[in-house]
Image (cartoon, rainbow, N blue to C red):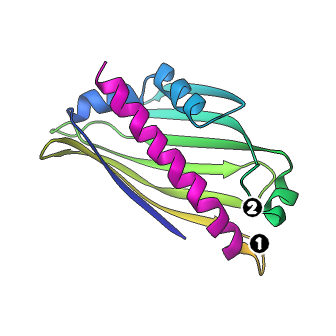
Amino acid sequence: MKIAKSIEYAATPEEVFAVLSDVKFQEAKCAATAAIKHSADVKTVGDHTVITTERILPSDGLPDFAKSMVGDTLKVTETQDWGPASGGGGRRGTVEMAVAGAPIVLKGTLMLAPGAGGTVETLDAELKAKVPLIGGKIEKAAAPPIEEAIDIEAETAAKWLRR
């Protein structure tokens, strides 16, 4: 299942990336998504910035068939690997999200680019649930909370940029 989002920020790509790569922002993002417990790490690996978050989330909103696979909580690990800035400050990266104990993976690309009002961040990803017969149902159940988390991250980043 395709998940694509485009988010506009009233700031330069450098300012947006400074927020996104701030470990305190990553912790705030996790807390804003109702994580019971979370951790965040930002590392420089060569000319790449690797952002990793782990969240323990309640599985309350999932359908019973999905909840039976993961239990009362979900452990979600997200890794963003951002490349170096281009001449205009834009960046390209990858994102991968996995749920421990469940055959659900989101993989895609990220991009920050200068836009008319500042910066546009785009996500182009595929959500896959590798479960025979019910994979599509799992993807449809997982997509709305993932899209909601993306929206919460965007709102949190916009607040941080206004600080």
Q: Is residue 90 left or right of residue 87?
A: right
Which residue does the image show at 26% across and 27% down from the upper left?
15
Give the percent coordinates (x, y) of residue 31: 59, 28
Could you say whether the residue bearing mark 2 is in a helix, strand or loop?
loop
The one of 119 and 48 positioned closer to us in this rendering: 119
CA distance for labels 1 and 2: 7 Å
In the drawing, does residue 129 fall left or right of residue 78?
right
Q: Which residues are magenta?
A: 136-163
Question: In the current view of this chain or complex, which residue is farthest to the bottom?
Answer: 133
Q: Hey, which quadrant is residue 131 in on the image?
A: bottom right
Q: Are marks 1 and 2 in contact (CB under 8 Å)?
A: yes
Q: Secondary structure at mark 1?
A: loop
Residue indicated by mark 2: 103
Which residue is denoted by mark 1 in the rendering? 131
Q: Residue at x 76, y 63 (%)?
A: 63
Q: Position of residue 88 (x, y in %)?
A: 15, 39
Direction front: furthest residue: 61
Name which residue lies at 43% across and 30% down: 46
Q: Is residue 156 above or below residue 74?
A: above
- Could you tell me the amino acid type at mark 1? Val
* Disc ID at residue 141: none
Question: Magenta segment: does it hold 37?
Answer: no
Badge 1 or badge 2: first in the primary sequence = 2
